[in-house]
Image: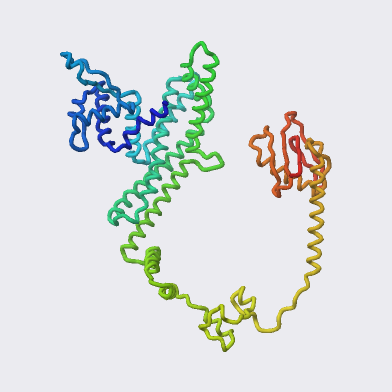
Amino acid sequence: MIAARSGDLFRHVSSEKAAIYRAVLDCFAAAKRAFRLHLRPDDLLREAQWPGAPPSSEELAQTLDQLVAWGNLRAQADTARVSTLEDFYRRRLLYRLTVGGEAVEAGLVVFAAALARKGELQTVALDDILARLTTLQLLAADAELDAAKVHEALRDLVHVFEGLARHAETFMADLARTLELQRAELDAVMGFKTRLIDYLERFIRELVERSGRIAVALEALEPSVQRLLQRVAEREAGDAAPDDADGRQLAFAQKMAAWAERWSGFRLWFLSDGRSPAQAELLRAAARSAIPRLLSAVSALNERRAGRSDRSADFRRLAVWFAQTPDAGQAHRLWRAAFGLSPARHLALAAPAEVMASTPWGASPPLAIHPRLREQGRLPTRGGPPPIRDRSQARALLAAQMAEQAAQLTQARERLVGAGITRLSQIGELDAATFRLFLNLLGEALSAQSRPDRPVERSSADGLLRVRLTPLIDGREAVIETELGRFAGRDHLIEIAAV
C-alpha cells in the first residue's frame, strides 16, 4: 500500500494536465519556502505561473481534488471566513503539501539540478585536498589528537574529493558526447576547439603537479591513518545509547568500516595499488586522448567542407541507386560499373575450344584446375614433379606414441579415482604421468577457490573427472614423492571421482 501511494505521488508528472499540476505544486513549493503553510484556491489563481490562461474555479477545484487523491496535497475546512450559516455549508477549503508531496518536490528539484549540472575539472579542488592533507599531518603529529579538528578536516577532505570525482566523471562523459561534432557548424567547432584544448592543457598541467604532491602527502600520512580514522569513528559512535555497550561497539565498527572504505577510495585516486593505475592517471589519459579526438573531428569537418570524398556517404548513395533499379539486369550492370567485377573470362583459355565464353557454368563441361593454382593462385614450375615421400613409418610411430600416452592417461585416471577420499599426504608415490594429471586437477581446483579456508569442487578440462578439495585446519604439510621430484604444500582432503 505504501509503494502504491508512493507511485501515485508522481502520477501528475506524466498525466495529460502535467503543466497545470506542476504550476499548482510549484506555487505550493514557493509558499512553503516563504513559510506559508496553507493556500486557498484564490491565492493559486492569483500567484501561480499558469502555462496558458488561468483555469476556471471549477477546473482548479478538480485539479486540487485530484492532487489530494494522489496524496500530494491535504485539504481541510477553511473556517476563518465563516460568518453565517450559509458560509458554513459552502465549500471552503485550505490546502497544504503533505509529507510525501514535500518529498516529491524536493526530489524533483534535485533531479532538475542534476540534469542541468555541467561537469568541470576542478584544479582548485586539488589545492583544497592538499591543504586538508597538510592539516591532517599537523594534527597527527600531536601526541593527543584533537578529535573535533581531525573530524572536521576529514569531513572537508571527503566533501572536496567527492565533488572533484563527481565533476570529473560528469565532464568526461559530457566531453565524449560533445566530441560528436561532425554535424556541427565549422565556425562553432573551431571556437570550441581552441577553448577546450586550452582548458584541457591547463588541467593536465595542474593535475600532474598537484597529484604528485598529494601522493607524497598520502605516503607521509599513511602511518597515522589508522589512528586518525579510529579517533573519528569513536567520536561519531559516541551518539549511541549510553546504556547499550553492544550497540556502541556495533556503531563504532560500522563507522570505522565506512571511514576505511572512504579513505581507500580516496587513496586509490592518487596512488596505484599495483594491479591498476591510479584514477588520477586514468583521468589524465582520458583528458589527453580527448585532444586528438577533437582534432580528428575538426579535420573531418575540413575535409567535408573542401568537398573530399566520404566513403560512407558514397556507399549510402550507391545503396539508394541499387534500391531504385527496375530489374536484376540493371542491378548487375550497376554492380559491374561500381566495383569493376566481371565474369572470370580468363578461365576460357584453359577450356575446350568448342565451349563459348557465354556458356553458363552449369551447362559447361568440368574443367580440371591444378591444385596449386587453386590454393596459391599460380601454376607449378616447369619440370618433373617432386618425389613423393613415404610417411607410413612416421605415421605408425606417431600412432604408437598416441596409444602409449592414452594407456598412461587411463592408468593415471584409475590410480587417482581408486584412492577415494584421502589426504594429500596419504596419496603415496606417483609416477610422472599420474603426477602430471594430478597436478592439473589440483590447479583447476585451487584456481576456483575463493578463500583458502573454503572447500571447492571442480571438473577437469575434458569433463571426465571431478575433484573436490577440502582444506584441513590442523596445519599439517603434505609431501608427495614423484618421479619428477618432491611436491610439498598445505595438506587437504581430496576426492577424485569419475563423472
In the drawing, does residue 380 fall left or right of residue 100? right
Quadrant housing the N terminus: top left
For this orientation, the residue located farthest to the left is: 84
Give the vertical position of 394 relative to 437 (above or below). Answer: below
Viewport quadrant of the C terminus: top right
Q: Quadrant of residue 496?
A: top right
Look at 81% across and 68% down and name the residue there.
393
- Considering only vertical position in the picture, is 245 above or below 219? above
| Image coordinates for residue 61, horizontal then vertical, percent | 23, 28
- For residue 194, side relative to residue 255 (left or right): left
Q: As rendered, which of 79 and 468 lies closer to the eye?
A: 79
Q: Is residue 79 left or right of residue 192?
A: left
Tag count in the figure?
A: 0
Q: Quadrant of residue 466?
A: top right
In the rendered image, residue 177, in percent from the top left (x then y), is placed at 38, 48
Query: Foreground: 153 or 334?
Result: 334
Q: Relative to 366, is 43 on the left or the right?
A: left
